[in-house]
Image (cartoon, helix red, strand yellow):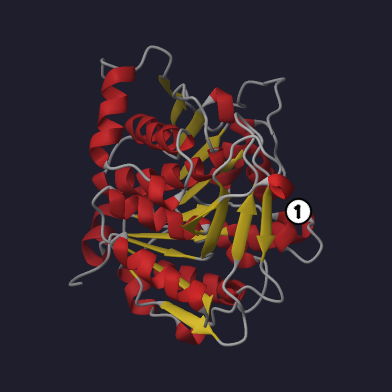
Amino acid sequence: MAGPLDVITMGRIGVDIYPLQTGVPLADVETFGKFLGGSPTNVAVAAARLGRSAAVITRTGRDPFGDYCHRALREFGVDDRWVTDVPGSPTPVTFCEIFPPDDFPLYFYRQPTAPDLVIHPDELDLTAIAAARVFWMTGTGLCAEPSRTATLTALAARHAAGDTDRAATDRATDRAATDQVATVFDLDWRPMFWPDGSPERARPHYREALAHATVAVGNVAECEVATGEREPRACAEALLDAGVRLAVVKQGPRGVLAMDRDGTVVQAPPHPVEVVNGLGAGDAFGGALCHGLLAGWAPDRLTRYANAAGAIVAGRLACSAAMPRAAEVDALLAAAAPHPAPPHSRTTRHSRTTPPPHHEERFP
């Protein structure tokens, strides 16, 4: 694949074993489907489905499930050159229960050590990471060594190549030199992956990663781990203060709040959908977010598009195999919002020297 990749993601991979029966406890399920899984892997698949060149940096076990991951990645059009195996560590398997519309318990089998946490810094292709137009990493990658150091090394390589902490007036020059568009930190808080599940212990590592990122995305609970804040606008403010240019706060049924460092604030409503399995919606959102960032879209269009992609996948069973193509997202947007701006979306200009309005609501 010539030239820099559009998207490189780094982190979890595995096999999702999902029930083909809805509303049935896992102990009683008799039929299952096998799918490629792992959030950063799904984001790469989602970006590829939208026409972007994508690759994932991760590791599997040296086993049949690892072979399956390689085959599935290639079938989805995702470059697997940086997917290596770890002898003696099984490829992770994840089970779930499906109780629509909002109860999808997950059961992770990642013992004794998940191979995707055994990514070493000296194994990374730092030149490719620095050159990628979008680099996507996750909070889970910070939960253990050597993955933590590898993830921070990758971020530092992009920083050194000209992304992050540049003044806005220098961005055009930086992009011309490096072709970088964004370094995205998916806050991805999974307490069961951390030694003691403590947000306070995780927060310093999140802060270190945020200093290198240009975009942060997460739900309110994940933003609270990263910032100590809980109210959505306060979360976005804190993420901007930590160094990113764009903060994206997902609020479930209240839609998405996006705040840009230039003062733009967007409140994008969700798309109504009959939920089948909500687990892949966030990854579809992520792949669509990468697509929109690469296209240079403004925050309002970016968030509406990502919301639509997430809604499509929430209405389907699988995660990776359910990722939509661009025509499907465009069709949903056309049906839901025939005018350029949907009636319940709003974009405002926000002075970051003015305290944001207080909200009583608290969201999971």
Q: Residue reaching furthest front?
A: 30
- To which quarter of the image does residue 102 belong? top right
Residue name at image x 66 percent, y 63 percent: 205
Residue name at image x 48 percent, y 68 percent: 155
- To which quarter of the image does residue 77 belong? bottom left
**Where in the figure is residue 194, as x and y percent of width and height?**
73, 63
Which quarter of the image is occupied by the C terminus?
top right
Residue name at image x 55 percent, y 52 percent: 32
Q: Is residue 314 left or right of residue 305?
A: right
**Dot 1: few (<14), some (14–19), or many (≥20) neighbours within 10 Å?**
some
User: Viewer-proximal residue, 9 or 17?
Assistant: 17
Residue 68 lies, with reference to residue 209, above or below; the image says below
Which quarter of the image is occupied by the N terminus?
bottom left
Can you identify the residue that label 1 sits on? 199
Helix, strand or loop status at disc 1:
helix
Residue 316 lies, with reference to residue 339, above or below; the image says below
Q: Is residue 28 left or right of residue 83?
A: right
Which amino acid does the dot numbered 1 rest on? Pro
Q: Is residue 249 left or right of residue 224?
A: left
